[in-house]
């Protein structure tokens, strides 16, 4: 009789254990998805930063060369006006880039969007009767 009671207790806990196991497996899958998305985002970010730095370096070298070329070409006539004009063009370009970078950061996609979507699906699944 004690075996029957013991087996009935385990049978009653079976569905609960399966449900807890399912929830743990679900959380595990979601955490793996977060990890994958985080690794992808980190790789994308590093690639963008690297390419951005290289492009800035080349752009600066080109601008220095252009500035020197223009200054030498106009050295005898209007060197101060030409240098002031070049400086104004650089300042306007910097302001435009700063505004665009700022708007790009504000319009960036939500980080972990796929994970959040999966959590919403899970929440909706548990709410349905």
Image: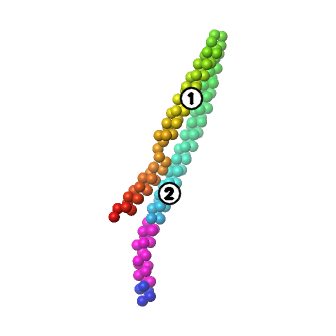
Q: Is residue 6 visible?
A: yes
Q: Helix, strand, or loop for circle 2?
A: helix
Sequence-wise, which precedes: disc 2 or disc 1? Answer: 2
Please state the horizontal and vertical placement of residue 35, each as a whole percent of the image.
Answer: 52, 54
Q: Residue at x 58, y 26 (%)?
A: 91
Left/right placement of residue 21 relative to residue 39 reads left
Q: Helix, strand, or loop for circle 1?
A: helix
Residue extending farthest to the bottom is: 1
Which residue is labeled 2 in the image?
Answer: 32
Left/right placement of residue 105 relative to residue 8 reads right
Residue 20 within the segment the image draws in magenta: yes
Q: Magenta segment, which residues?
A: 6-22
- Name the front one of labels 2 and 1: 1
Please state the horizontal and vertical placement of residue 119, each as a whole percent of the image.
Answer: 43, 56
Q: Where does the C terminus fall, quadrant-wise?
A: bottom left
Left/right placement of residue 126 relative to residue 57 reads left
Q: Residue at x 54, y 31 (%)?
A: 97
Q: Residue at x 57, y 33 (%)?
A: 55
Residue 113 within the segment the image draws in magenta: no
Which residue is labeled 1 in the image?
Answer: 94
Q: Residue at x 54, y 33 (%)?
A: 98
| Relative vertical location of residue 42 with respect to residue 24 in this rendering, above or below | above
């Amino acid at each position: 009789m004690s075996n029957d009671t013991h087996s009935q207790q385990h049978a009653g806990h079976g569905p609960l254990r399966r449900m807890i196991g399912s929830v743990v497996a679900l959380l595990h899958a979601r955490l793996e998805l977060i990890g994958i998305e985080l690794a992808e985002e980190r790789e994308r970010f590093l690639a963008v930063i690297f390419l951005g730095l290289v492009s800035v370096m080349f752009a600066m070298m080109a601008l220095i060369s252009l500035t020197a070329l223009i200054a030498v070409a106009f050295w005898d006539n209007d060197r101060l006006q030409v240098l002031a004009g070049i400086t104004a063009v650089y300042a306007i370009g910097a302001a435009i880039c700063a505004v665009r970078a700022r708007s790009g950061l504000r319009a960036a996609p939500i980080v972990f969007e796929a994970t959040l979507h999966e959590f919403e699906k899970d929440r909706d699944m548990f709410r349905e009767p």
